[in-house]
Amino acid sequence: MAEIIAKACSSPQTTELNADKRAPTLMKWVNIGTIEGALLVGVAATVDKKYRIPIILGATLEGVITYIEYLHGKSAGLKSTLPGTEEY
């Protein structure tokens, strides 16, 4: 639970705060990370046949939630007029 909360408070929040600078490459890296995660879940589901369905269902649910968090962070950040937190 702590790791999921930390994830939700970190990267999607940073995305929202700095979307004006990060938006051009943001979803590319979210997509790459999603593919990486799916591959590793596939390995886990292949190795652990007994818990294959729960592994796939849990990973799919978390993947969808995380993807939506990033989409929201990007959208809200691009609509915001507040300054970002990064300096270039």
Image (spheres, helix red, strand yellow):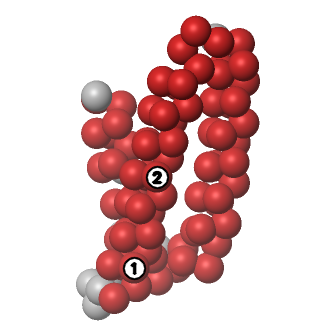
Q: Residues within 10 Å of mark 2 (few under 14, many from 20)?
A: few
Q: Residues within 10 Å of mark 1 (few under 14, many from 20)?
A: some
Counting residues from the start of the chain, the first of labels 1 and 2 encountered is 2
The picture places residue 79, in percent across and down from the top left corner, at: 34, 88
Is residue 35 or residue 13 the one in the foreground?
Answer: 35
Please give the label number shown on residue 75: 1
The picture places residue 6, in percent across and down from the top left corner, at: 32, 39
> Which quadrant: the C terminus?
bottom right
Q: For the residue marked with disc 2, what is the amino acid?
A: Val
Horizontal side of 74 relative to 6 (left or right) equals right
Evaluate whether residue 62 shows in this view. Answer: yes
CB under 8 Å between discs 1 and 2: no
Residue in the image at 43% along x and 43% along y:
61
SS at mark 2? helix
Residue in the image at 69% along x and 30% along y:
42
Horizontal side of 43 relative to 74 (left or right) equals right
SS at mark 1? helix
Among the 4 quarters of the image, the one containing residue 14: bottom left
Among the 4 quarters of the image, the one containing residue 7: top left
Please give the label number shown on residue 26: none
The residue that disc 2 covers is 64
What whole-number distance in Å separates the C-alpha atoms at marks 1 and 2? 16 Å
Q: Is residue 23 above or below residue 31?
A: below
Evaluate whether residue 86 shows in this view. Answer: no
Q: For the residue marked with disc 1, what is the amino acid?
A: Ser
The picture places residue 64, in percent across and down from the top left corner, at: 46, 52
The picture places residue 86, in percent across and down from the top left corner, at: 43, 70
* Number of numbered discs visible in the structure rendering: 2
Is residue 48 or residue 79 the one in the foreground?
Answer: 48
